[in-house]
Image: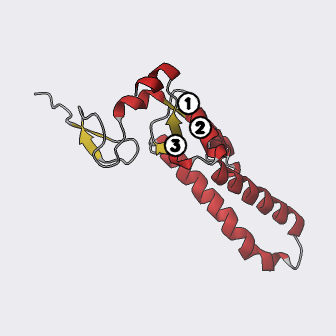
Amino acid sequence: MEKTKLTKKCPRCNEKTYINAKKCDNCGLIFSRLEYLSNKEAKTAMLKGEKEKIIYTSDFPRDLQRWKAIVLCALGGALGLHNIYVGRYIKGIFSLIFTVLTAIFILVLEGNVLASLYEIYLFIPGALVFIFWFYDLFLLLLNKYKVPVALDMPLEKRELK
């Protein structure tokens, strides 16, 4: 006997809802609009400061590829390349800055008497970057990593809704 699935998770709030529901009862997301989600629109809205247009979902939109994010995270995760690729600019820039500063301080202060005083200050941001790097890689591999998306509806569809 085949078991049929009766519920699905909302990509915005992760609450369970019935599979044939038109919108999420918890957050109000209209499921028919999900086909128009775009990461490019989210990046544009983020740069303009229009955060109310952005939702975070673990479903990668059509203009973003999960495998590229995984490769960027695996190879350049400490530099925050995967965060910059998906449009999480602040997290990506902080990762880049902390990694570069940690590398510079280690190279400059190696063998210096003052190096022992700075070791604690260097260890904390460097360790945080590596923790977030491995955590993001883990989330990407499990398809739980949240990417920003926004609606990108064609003009004729916008007028109808």
As rendered, which of 137 and 91 lies closer to the eye?
Answer: 91
Q: Earlier in the sequence, mark 3 or mark 2?
A: 3
Q: For the image shown, how many numbered marks are present on the structure? A: 3
> At which x and y percent is residue 47?
66, 44
Residue lying furthest left: 1
Give neighbour class at mark 3: few <14, some 14-19, many 20+ (Cα, 10 Å).
some
Q: Which residue bears the numbered disc 1?
A: 65
Q: Quadrant of the N terminus?
A: top left
Give neighbour class at mark 2: few <14, some 14-19, many 20+ (Cα, 10 Å).
many
Q: Residue at x 37, y 40 (%)?
A: 29
The secondary element bearing badge 3 is classed as helix
The secondary element bearing badge 2 is classed as helix
Query: Which labelled disc corresponds to residue 46?
Result: none
When asked about the image quadrant of residue 110, the answer is bottom right
Query: Which labelled disc corresponds to residue 53?
Result: 3
The secondary element bearing badge 1 is classed as loop
Q: Which residue bears the numbered disc 2?
A: 69
User: How far apart, in angstroms, are the residues tagged by discs 1 and 2?
Assistant: 7 Å
> At which x and y percent is residue 80?
67, 48
Q: Residue at x 62, y 63 (%)?
A: 128
- In the rendered structure, which amino acid carries the disc numbered 1? Gln
Q: Are marks 1 and 2 in contact (CB under 8 Å)?
A: yes
Q: Are marks 3 and 1 in contact (CB under 8 Å)?
A: no
- In the rendered structure, which amino acid carries the disc numbered 2? Ala
- In the rendered structure, which amino acid carries the disc numbered 3? Lys
User: How far apart, in angstroms, are the residues tagged by discs 3 and 2?
Assistant: 23 Å
Left or right: 14 in relation to 5: right
> At which x and y percent is residue 88?
61, 47
Left or right: 50 in relation to 60: right
Q: Quadrant of the C terminus?
A: top left
